[in-house]
Amino acid sequence: MKAKLFYLFMLSSLAGCTIDNYEMPHLTLSGKILDAQTNELIPSSGANAGALVKLYEGNSTQPLLYTVKPDGTFQNSRVFPATYKIVAEGAFDRVEDTITETISKDMQLDIKVTPHVRLQLTLAGITDTTAEIKMHYKKINADQEIVKLGVVWSTFAYPNATVFPEGDIILEDAAPALPAEGDRTYTVSGLKAGATYYIRALALTNNAGGYYNYSTQLEAEAK
């Protein structure tokens, strides 16, 4: 009798294993967060409080969260075939509040947004210890107020407001009467001769998520 019960137990266990043997997610969703006017990538902080892409499967209210890379691209290679509502969140306003896509194969998806602030950075000069950086900023969304402006630099690519190894940050409080568009000049000091530095401009508005806008990064070698 015990042998028969054991045999039945083993059969039920094997049946349970067969039922739970679901196919693993295998599709890749990749894309870009693009400025709707310029069609340029919107840089981000990356893993440090950077922009997010949220995927809601069907009627689910619990999203799958994907961090946007510092260069403004995103990718996930573990996506189930399904219909998703896709929402981007960051230092921008969405052109489409929600995008609905049925993912049945690998997909490339570009998401158009309007950044709160556009930033351009130029290197005016660099020595063995000092660099002069010129920044042009332009507030795009009228309902946003710029509260901080500055530059960040590091010997590692894509420094951000909180992580800048072997570098530093200059972050100034913006005056309430700050014009919607203007220029700033920053002197970066303490550089080491022969080292390569990655430099980005950054701006913080009064957005609810506390997301920063960034410029594309400059690469410069201290002479």
Image: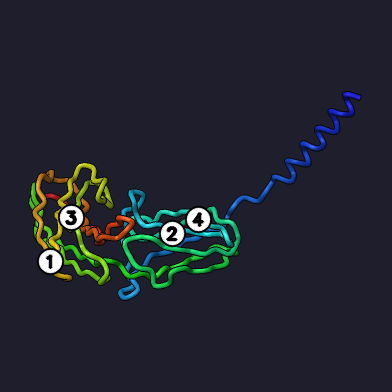
N-terminal-most mark, 2 or 4: 2
Cα separation between marks 2 and 1: 34 Å
Cα separation between marks 4 and 3: 33 Å
Residue 39's image quarter?
Answer: bottom left
Residue identifier under label 3: 151
Mark number for residue 177? Answer: 1
Q: Indicate the secondary structure of the residue bearing disc 4.
A: loop
Residue 128 seen in the current view: no
Report the amino acid beneath label 4.
Answer: Pro
Assess disc 3: are there few (<14), some (14-19) or many (≥20) residues with their C-alpha within 10 Å of its C-alpha: many
152 and 178: which one is in front? 178
Do callouts 1 and 3 mark residues in contact (Cβ within 8 Å)? no
Spot occupied by residue 61 in the image (x, y as percentages of width and height): 53, 57
Do callouts 4 and 3 mark residues in contact (Cβ within 8 Å)? no
Report the amino acid beneath label 2.
Answer: Val
Give the label, 2 or 3, closer to the camera. 2
N-terminal-most mark, 4 or 3: 4
Q: Indicate the secondary structure of the residue bearing disc 1.
A: loop
4 and 204: which one is in front? 204
Horizontal arrangement in the rendering, residue 191 relative to residue 57 (left or right): left
Horizontal arrangement in the rendering, residue 113 relative to residue 75 (left or right): left
Report the amino acid beneath label 1.
Answer: Ala
Cα separation between marks 2 and 4: 9 Å
Q: Quadrant of the N terminus?
A: top right
Assess disc 1: are there few (<14), some (14-19) or many (≥20) residues with their C-alpha within 10 Å of its C-alpha: few
- x 28%, y 52%: residue: 158
